[in-house]
Image (spheres, rainbow, N blue to C red):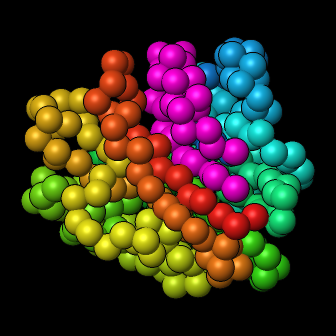
Amino acid sequence: MKIASFNINGIKARLPALLQWLEEAKPDVALLQEIKSVDENFPREPIEDLGYQVETHGMKSFNGVAILSKLPLEDITRGLPGDDEDIQARWIEATVMGDKQAVRVCGLYLPNGNPTPGPKYDYKLSWMKRQYARAQELMALEEPFLMAGDYNVIPQAEDCWDTKPWLEDALYLPETREAYRKLMNLGFTEAFRARNQAAMNYTFWDYQAGAWNKNNGIRIDHFLLSPQCADLLQDCQIDRDTRGREKPSDHVPIWVELDA
């Protein structure tokens, strides 16, 4: 079972890039972030023509997440529990029925949190507390599940081309990384680092200042696997080359291969 995560940065602007990648990479499941579309305007047909079921949790102009799946989906839920007043579309869950094993997938677009300090950063930290609570609930089931997407967290210095510009940024502040470590300490395996310890492996390059050509990137898109899911892990890779294509997202896909 190949599961990918891709912050598409606007489905309407990036649809050709998405379709090209889907045809090449052939993920069984793709978790999308920043679709920036209400559900009824999401361009389903060309994606469905490639054999995918499309499930979205969108909102106008901002945020929005989706699950594209060639495998059967069950128990689809939208929205991160814990705050009934939160209207931002940042979380979608479903159970993917594999040939050997069912896997619960949580697709997420964690808040950016800038500028700091301020209400946007407060929202980021409170959102991470809610994610922690949901993770505790899923861990208690002792079943394979994963939480994947754009975390807007630079976990460690080697996940950034240069930490100096990020020292006061919400993606790298000590409180952010502490919240991420607390989540990890529930027993998650970070899939990419389980397979590759090298520095200079990034998933995001800004559109500004020639970041892509200079390889001034950061690694902020992550797969966190429960112990039961980590036992199924076969591979995790970053599709770096998509960033150099025409009209790319500023993120690139990351994917895991599971024995499921």
- Specify whether residue 16 is in view: yes
Q: Residue at image x 54%, y 19%? A: 15
203 relative position to 136: left or right: left
Against 67, residue 148 (above or below) is below
Q: Depth check: give the residue in front, 246 or 132.
A: 246
- Specify whether residue 136 is in view: no
Magenta stretch holds residue 16 = yes
**In the rendering, at what x and y percent does residue 82 appear?**
71, 61
Q: Residue at image x 43%, y 71%? A: 195
**In the rendering, at what x and y percent does residue 133 appear?**
67, 72
Q: Residue at image x 67%, y 73%? A: 232
Magenta segment: 1-28
Report the number of numbered marks.
0
Q: Quadrant of the N terminus?
A: bottom right
**In the rendering, at what x and y percent does residue 167 appear?**
17, 61
Q: Depth check: give the residue in front, 160 or 59.
A: 160
Q: Residue at image x 29%, y 57%? A: 201
Against 227, residue 30 (above or below) is above
Residue 153 is drawn in which quadrant? bottom left
Magenta stretch holds residue 96 = no
Q: Quadrant of the C terminus?
A: bottom right
Q: Depth check: give the residue in front, 105 or 136.
A: 105
24 relative position to 43: left or right: left
**In the rendering, at what x and y percent does residue 147 appear?**
61, 61
